[in-house]
């Protein structure tokens, strides 16, 4: 029986001393009844080694933890926690002993230490609910959903250290805390998670020195090196890049992208970097259409992979303004330099690890861009930015004072400074007005002129003067580009449709097309370039290997594409072949007409 203190003050003092006493230190208590003396010694050594790896906050959150070595765990299970106890596979202890335990860094010895830390992580998570933290779920890959409360499935399946981490957030925490404590390269492979855990625990183990640049593979580098090392210190700003909509059902609300304003080598980071257009890059989420021909049904049902593409800005400008005749708005985002760095880190993680599904409604370019901003810049997660349309996302960014749309107020200045890239349709209409005035063309709009059969445009060529001939030449080139796009769609249906490719030539073309698609699939999902081993962001020795592989694949894809295009015309329907030939004949005739008119003009100027 404990005697009562004589005075009330003494009793209060005892209570205060008890409350002020330090928490009980972590005690890992192995059950040694079924162990030999050598096994018991190795078990204590292993558990002491694991305890020394734990941050103080982790160790202080636990107290007495019984540990048992078992022979009855399932084959693929290294450990379990049940009722506060840790059960571990005895085979791991035997391998720890065989490989010298803590005295050696053997690959076969590490699983025992990792298993102990993994199960201790579960006990810690049970108390601290780390796996329910919204920020950790963002970083882990359980992203916020666009159209409903809650989160998506984890689609960060590529370059995972252990696929078991994707089964649920608790296992993700346990697997990643293993690597946080035991792998010095974790800070380089998963930098955002390393910072999160270091902040949470108030300490971190020693880490390797990380390369400053982030590796990306450019799927279509137009002859450049496909592997790009992007240093966040060279990125001056990030713009929300909106491709304006058109009449196509899947393009009506535009397309969301992010423009990276990258400074040219040697230029200090600053506003002048906006003029280094050749170095700017675009982050664009797109459906990888693995059958070439886009299917609305497959897009609605998520049959297409969603991939993060890194593209040269000049290529994006060509694609939208010249081919699709859509303007590009480039609206600066209000981001600090450290936020730009974390955003680019997240983009690189998506690039190497993410294999999502593209849904035209619920997981399209706007949703993917929103999730990248939400997860890559924690401050933005505080705003309600979610939208399923690119224009809707822009409006929400502007309302939250995160995007500065004032740069578009003066269209002429926006064109001069690169905040707006106008579609060539405006230029085509201007050229049509030149020809219409000179020749009294009956059509009211350039679209009506381009819709005419090429043969109906031919008679006007002989009546044109030098200026209107130049205008007609530009319009014929536009008509040819449109016909080539239509021909490409016809080839898709013929070569990859249900009835396409039945003859020998068609079968060969179908095979060649599928080979090109396979190569493009490898380049747009770069984790496939690094099979086996490694996780997270590739490290220098890994991406040096990826560089050679990506260059070879890009060259092979380009050569096969050129061969296919050279032979493609003969597979078109006869009417399409004749339409292309007639337009090309008009271009040749206009070229001849311009030379003749130029010679006549120069002849009149002779003395």
Image: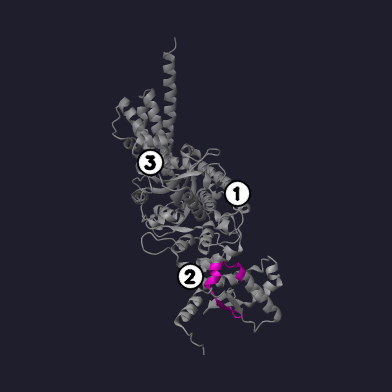
Question: Position of 370 compared to 233: left or right?
Answer: left
Question: Position of 476 compared to 354: left or right?
Answer: left
Residue 547, disc? 1
Give the magenta-colored segment's residue range: 51-74
Question: Position of 327 compared to 13: left or right?
Answer: left
- Res. 102 in view: yes
- Res. 578 in view: no
- Measured in 3D between alpha carbons, the distance from the residue under mark 1 to the one under mark 2, in whole angstroms, is 42 Å
Residue at the farthest top position: 607
Question: Dot 1: within a 10 Å radius of its alpha carbon, few (fewer than 14), some, or many (20 or more) residues?
Answer: some
Question: Dot 2: within a 10 Å radius of its alpha carbon, few (fewer than 14), some, or many (20 or more) residues?
Answer: few
**The residue tagged with tag 1: helix, strand or loop?**
helix
Question: Dot 3: within a 10 Å radius of its alpha carbon, few (fewer than 14), some, or many (20 or more) residues?
Answer: many
Report the number of numbered marks. 3
Cβ atoms under marks 2 and 3 closer than 8 Å: no
| Residue 55 highlighted magenta (yes or no) | yes
Task: Please name whichever residue, 80 or 184, is drawn nearer the observer in this view of the structure.
Answer: 184
Above or below, 194 relative to 68 = above
Q: Which residue is mark 2?
A: 128
Q: Residue at x 60, y 69 (%)?
A: 114
Please identify the quarter of the rendering in which residue 95 is found.
bottom right
Whole-percent x and y of residue 544? Answer: 62, 50
Dot 1 or dot 2: first in sequence order is 2
Please identify the quarter of the rendering in which residue 71 is found.
bottom right
Q: Which residue is mark 3?
A: 327
Whole-percent x and y of residue 312? Answer: 49, 43
């Amino acid at each position: 029986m404990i005697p009562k203190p004589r005075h009330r003050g003494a009793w209060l003092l005892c209570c205060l001393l008890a409350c002020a006493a330090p928490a009980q230190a972590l005690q890992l208590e192995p059950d040694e009844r079924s162990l030999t003396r050598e096994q018991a010694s190795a078990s204590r050594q292993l558990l002491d080694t694991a305890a020394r790896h734990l941050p103080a906050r982790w160790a202080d959150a636990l107290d007495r933890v019984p540990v048992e070595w078992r022979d009855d765990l399932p084959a693929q299970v290294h450990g379990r926690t049940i009722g506060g106890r840790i059960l571990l596979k005895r085979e791991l202890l035997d391998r720890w002993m065989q490989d010298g335990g803590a005295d050696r860094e053997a690959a076969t010895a590490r699983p025992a230490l990792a298993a102990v830390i993994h199960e201790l992580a579960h006990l810690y998570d049970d108390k601290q609910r780390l796996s329910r933290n919204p920020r950790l779920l963002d970083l882990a890959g359980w992203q916020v959903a666009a159209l409903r409360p809650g989160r998506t499935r984890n689609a960060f399946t590529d370059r995972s250290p252990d696929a078991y981490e994707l089964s649920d957030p608790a296992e993700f925490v346990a697997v990643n805390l293993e690597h946080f404590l035991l792998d010095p390269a974790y800070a380089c492979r998963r930098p955002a998670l390393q910072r999160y855990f270091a902040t949470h625990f108030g300490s971190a183990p020693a880490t390797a020195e990380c390369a400053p640049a982030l590796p990306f593979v450019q799927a279509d580098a137009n002859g450049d090196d496909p592997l790009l090392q992007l240093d966040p210190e060279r990125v001056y700003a990030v713009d929300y890049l909106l491709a304006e909509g058109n009449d196509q059902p899947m393009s009506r609300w535009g397309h969301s992208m992010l423009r990276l304003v990258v400074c040219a080598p040697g230029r200090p980071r600053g506003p002048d970097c906006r003029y280094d257009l050749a170095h700017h890059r675009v982050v664009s989420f797109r459906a990888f259409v693995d059958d070439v021909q886009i299917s609305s049904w497959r897009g609605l049902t998520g049959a297409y992979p969603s991939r993060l593409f890194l593209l040269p800005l000049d290529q994006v400008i060509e694609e939208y303004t010249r081919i699709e005749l859509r303007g590009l708005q480039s609206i600066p985002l209000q981001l600090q330099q450290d936020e730009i760095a974390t955003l680019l880190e997240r983009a690189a993680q998506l690039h190497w690890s993410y294999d999502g599904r593209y849904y035209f409604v619920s997981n399209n370019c706007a949703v993917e861009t929103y999730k990248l901003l939400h997860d890559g810049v924690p401050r933005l997660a505080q705003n309600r930015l979610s939208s399923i349309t690119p224009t809707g996302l822009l409006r929400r960014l502007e309302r939250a004072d995160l995007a500065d749309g004032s740069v578009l107020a003066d269209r002429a200045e926006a064109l001069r400074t690169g905040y707006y890239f106008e579609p060539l349709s405006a230029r085509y209409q201007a050229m049509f007005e030149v020809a219409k005035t000179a020749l009294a063309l009956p059509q009211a709009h350039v679209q009506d002129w381009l819709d005419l059969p090429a043969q109906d445009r031919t008679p006007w060529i002989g009546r044109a003067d030098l200026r209107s001939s130049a205008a007609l030449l530009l319009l014929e080139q536009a008509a040819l580009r449109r016909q080539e796009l239509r021909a490409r769609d016809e080839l898709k249906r013929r070569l990859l449709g249900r009835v396409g490719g039945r003859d020998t030539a068609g079968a060969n073309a179908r095979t060649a097309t599928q080979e090109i698609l396979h190569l493009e699939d490898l380049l747009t999902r770069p984790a496939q370039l690094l099979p086996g081993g490694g996780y997270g962001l590739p490290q220098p020795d890994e991406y040096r290997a990826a560089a050679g592989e990506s260059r070879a694949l890009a060259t092979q894809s380009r050569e096969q594409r050129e061969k296919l295009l050279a032979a493609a015309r003969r597979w078109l329907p006869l009417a399409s072949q004749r339409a292309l030939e007639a337009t090309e004949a008009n271009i040749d005739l206009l070229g001849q007409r311009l030379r003749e008119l130029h010679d006549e003009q120069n002849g009149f100027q002779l003395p």
